[in-house]
Image: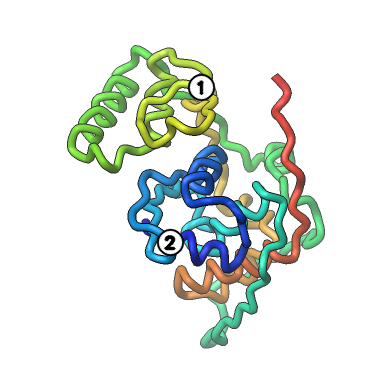
Amino acid sequence: MKLSPAWLREFAGARVDDRRLAQDLTSVGIAVESSHGEGKNAVFEMEIGTNRPDAMNHYGVAREAAVIYNLALRALDAKLPAAPGKPDFIVEIADKDGCARYTARLIRENGFLGSFSISAGRPESDAFLDLVDFANRRQPLHQSIVCNSIASALRGEFGNYHATNWTRDSDLFINPLMAQYWTFDAPRLVAGMAYAEELTETERLEDARLVIERRRTMLDIRPRRPIPL
């Protein structure tokens, strides 16, 4: 995925050079795998995880930059097309103003299906490591930061360990929790989303992105804090 750092600055005026911007974004999980060009023609080659569709666009990445540098984010004036006809199903939001962090509530409501991990030495983990190594050989200029971080954890690495050159100038925290996965019941998960009803009226990925972005502009950004270890 390619993004323009010049466009990112139109939403959040980060006063750092492209190299520093790429390093800081990578350090918070918005991976910049490479950079091409200079000035207004510069382009970042990004790797955005599938769990972050909100960051698969210039505005989403600019929001992350605004948090990093404590800057104001230029608001979007999102205009959605009217939905044709009635939605196929109705989602009732019982507490629209409730806390958006609802994992604990899902556990209480039996919406948490459990967790699992990829354990070192198992056939599944060996196959995963082989796949990562194969992908690294086939795509040396596009090595996945996420997959290589998980592979590093499975191989017993810890802390600021770098399996790819893309992260050399940033601080990583490789740890065993990277191989841990949580699973949830999808209908219960959706029912707890404050903007679920708006999403039912969308038809395209772009429409859904605008709904998410509009919702995020209504929220106060929580300050970053270290994880207690």
- Please state, as top left, top right, bottom left or bottom right, where the N terminus lies in the image: bottom left
Q: Which residue is mark 2?
A: 39
What residue would you read off at disc 1?
160
Considering only vertical position in the picture, is 204 above or below 113?
below
Q: Position of residue 151 (x, y in %)?
A: 37, 24
**Which of labels 1 and 2 is toward the front?**
2
Pointer 1 or 2: first along the chain:
2
Could you tell me the amino acid type at mark 1? Asn
Q: Is residue 204 left or right of residue 93?
A: left
Residue occupying image coordinates x 22% and y 40%: 139
Identify the residue shown where x is 55% and y is 34%: 182
Rendered residue at 73%/23% (across/down): 228
Residue 60 in the image, given as x and y percentages of width and height: 56, 59
Determine the secondary structure under disc 1: loop
Residue 65, how many percent across, how many down? 60, 52
Q: Residues within 10 Å of mark 1 (few under 14, many from 20)?
A: few
What residue do we see at 73% from left, 63% from top?
Answer: 93
- Front-lying residue, 160 or 157: 160
